[in-house]
Image (tube, rainbow, N blue to C red):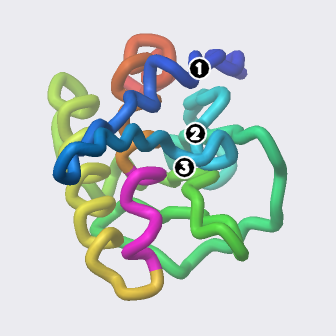
């Protein structure tokens, strides 16, 4: 079983500075939308690689709302934040050498599709932060990928 990898919010949430006329506006994500920890492990029970994200607060999560070519996203019922990602490594149909890259591509494609659904348009920053948290810690998150 893998350990949680702690995420430094400042590594994920970079200030977005915009200038409107003579006024400079700095925007940050809500601290509730920035993942605090991430982990990944292969579940032999469901035969999928599972990536979990932990946030400042817990909430009820739902599955099945977002399924994309071997990727199932478990989202917060109220917030729409990504809490869990199930990856069907067999369905991705990639060799063990290219598995990590295949997962990253499939996950990026799934999040791009999710960002365009009307219900989730205001969650784009969270999805980018979740992907960033995973990729910045990919060595530890993907350590338990099956060979």
Q: Quadrant of residue 13?
A: top left
| Of callouts 3 and 2, the N-terminal one | 2
Determine which residue is flagged by label 1.
7
Residue 39 vertical placement versus 81 (above, below): above
Label 2 close to label 1 by CB (< 8 Å): yes
Apparent side of residue 70 relative to residue 84 in the rendered image (left or right): left
Q: Which residues are magenta?
A: 120-127
Q: How many marks?
A: 3
**Is residue 135 in view from this perspective?**
yes
Determine which residue is flagged by label 3.
47
Determine which residue is flagged by label 2.
34
137 in the magenta segment? no
Where residue 111 appears, x then y in whole percent? 32, 60
Residue at 43% in and 40% down: 129
Q: Distance between the Cα atoms at labels 2 and 1?
A: 9 Å
Where residue 26 appears, x then y in whole percent? 39, 38
Residue at 77% in and 39% down: 56
| Of callouts 2 and 1, the N-terminal one | 1
User: In this orientation, which residue lies closer to the viewer: 107 or 49?
Assistant: 107
Residue 59 vertical placement versus 48 (above, below): below
Residue at 29% in and 37% down: 17
Q: Distance between the Cα atoms at labels 3 and 1?
A: 27 Å
Q: Secondary structure at mark 1?
A: loop
Count residues near mark 3 (Cα–Cα under 10 Å), then give few for <14, some for 14-19, many for 20+: few
Q: Distance between the Cα atoms at labels 3 and 2?
A: 28 Å
| Of callouts 3 and 1, the N-terminal one | 1
Q: Quadrant of residue 78?
A: bottom right
């Amino acid at each position: 079983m893998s350990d949680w990898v702690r995420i430094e919010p400042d590594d994920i949430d970079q200030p977005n500075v915009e200038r409107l006329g003579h006024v400079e506006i700095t925007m940050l994500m809500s601290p509730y939308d920035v993942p605090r920890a991430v982990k990944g492990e292969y579940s032999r029970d469901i035969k999928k690689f599972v990536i979990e994200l932990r946030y400042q607060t817990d909430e009820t999560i739902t599955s099945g709302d977002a399924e994309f070519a071997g990727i199932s996203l478990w989202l917060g019922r109220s917030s729409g934040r990504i809490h869990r990602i199930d990856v069907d490594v067999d369905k991705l149909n990639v060799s063990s050498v290219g598995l990590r890259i295949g997962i990253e591509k499939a996950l990026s494609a799934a999040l791009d599709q999710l960002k365009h659904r009307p219900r989730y348009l205001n969650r784009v920053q969270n999805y980018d932060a979740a992907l960033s948290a995973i990729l910045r810690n990919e060595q530890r998150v993907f350590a338990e990928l099956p060979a």
